[in-house]
Amino acid sequence: MKPLHWDAINPFTGKPFTWDDPNLKFINDIGMYLEPGDPGFVPYPSSTPSPAQPKPKKRNYMASNPTPDPISELIAAGEDLYDGLVQHAVACEIKKNTPADFRADLDALIAAQNALAAAEGAEPAAYAALRTADSNGKGFIARAIKVLSIALGNDWSAEWTATGLPDQKVGIPSTQDKRFTALNGLAAYFTNNPGKENAPLSVTAAIATTLHSAVSDARQGVGNALNLTKTRVLARNEARDAFRLRFRGTINELEQCLSIDDPKWYDFGLNRPADPATPGQPSNVHATALGQGRVLIQIDGARRANSFNYYKQVIGTDTEPVKLINTEGTQHTAENLPAAATVQITVTGVNDAGEGQASEPVSVVVT
């Protein structure tokens, strides 16, 4: 119960109090009003409901022709677009992105991508050569320590310092860099102390020098391979950026020539802008067994998708994918799956235009 002031507004109705208000009381000529919980409080009628909010309009997705990001997709889309240019460039009066100019930029990208792939492909051989050279050096160091320990002892002392072994330890160094240094030190030591060499065990200054040079050359080979790859990446990226501009510019030029429902769009490997566009294919689908018959499904999403359909197919049981759920979330935990079964997971995007292409299936063994 609270006191009533002359200009009081009823906090429950938002309007001034009236004399016939059932919760208005006068006690000893003092105006009071009852609150919920006070004896005799009469609930107020519900306020007039607010008008129903209009339902959000469905978004009409029109087909778009985005420039692909993955190089392989960009090249494939470029080939399709080139084929269309060969057919229709004259009729469409293409001036800025002629078939010849388009082909030149596409071929430059293909060549740059192939050069990068070749450079990356050469790296494993360079690393293998380094591992072999380092292994040979490691074997020499082990033999040299065994030979020298007869005269210098098994424990580190000042006499071992001249051998060049790092970390003041009698043993094979733990890293490649340190083994490289040790080979150089042992080559110098045996050169200065030829009486400590043991030719039958292949422990000589000449062998140490040869092995040190082999590691040095192999290290240089790895460095050269990495530098070549870096150079090829920069060249590929430059060719990619140039072709992306060409690809986009060609589509922009086609938009000036073709109507949104012209079937010629398909000859270029493109979507007609007038067509409803279902979602793109979900990317980076991962399925992780969580135990107790559960599998966590995670995706990166899909272009134009409002929600996602998650499917499972138990190999040997389900003849086709079985829908688990439709949800806006980019992850879902499938439950009650049979233990030890192999399950294939696929995901599709959904929007007003329908369901898009399913993701590539991923397999997981249920635990």
Image (spheres, helix red, strand yellow):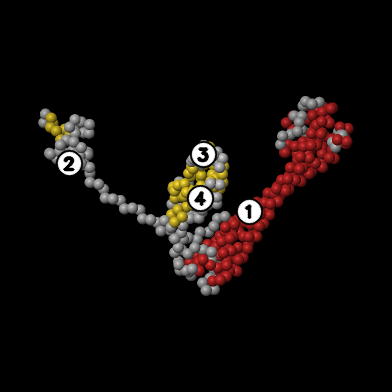
What residue did someone put label 4 on? 321
Residue at (50% x, 61% y) in the render: 65
Estimate the spatial distance between the alpha carbons at disc 2 and disc 3, rounded to whole Å.
63 Å
What residue did someone put label 3 on? 293
Please tell me the numbered disc located at residue 256.
Answer: none
Q: Going from the N terminus, do you reach mark 1 or mark 4 first?
A: 1
Amino acid marked by disc 4: Pro
Which quadrant holds residue 207?
top right
Residue at (20% x, 37% y) in the render: 43
x, y (%) of residue 229? Answer: 66, 52
Amino acid marked by disc 3: Gly
Q: Identify the secondary structure beneath mark 4.
A: loop
Amino acid marked by disc 2: Pro
| 165, 125: nearer the viewer | 125
Q: Going from the N terminus, do you reach mark 4 or mark 2 first?
A: 2
Number of residues whose C-alpha sits closer than 10 Å to that of mark 3, classed few (under 14), some (14–19) or many (20 or more): some
Position of the N terminus, as image quadrant, is top left
Amino acid marked by disc 1: Val
Left or right? Give the position of 277 relative to 71: left
What residue did someone put label 1 on? 233
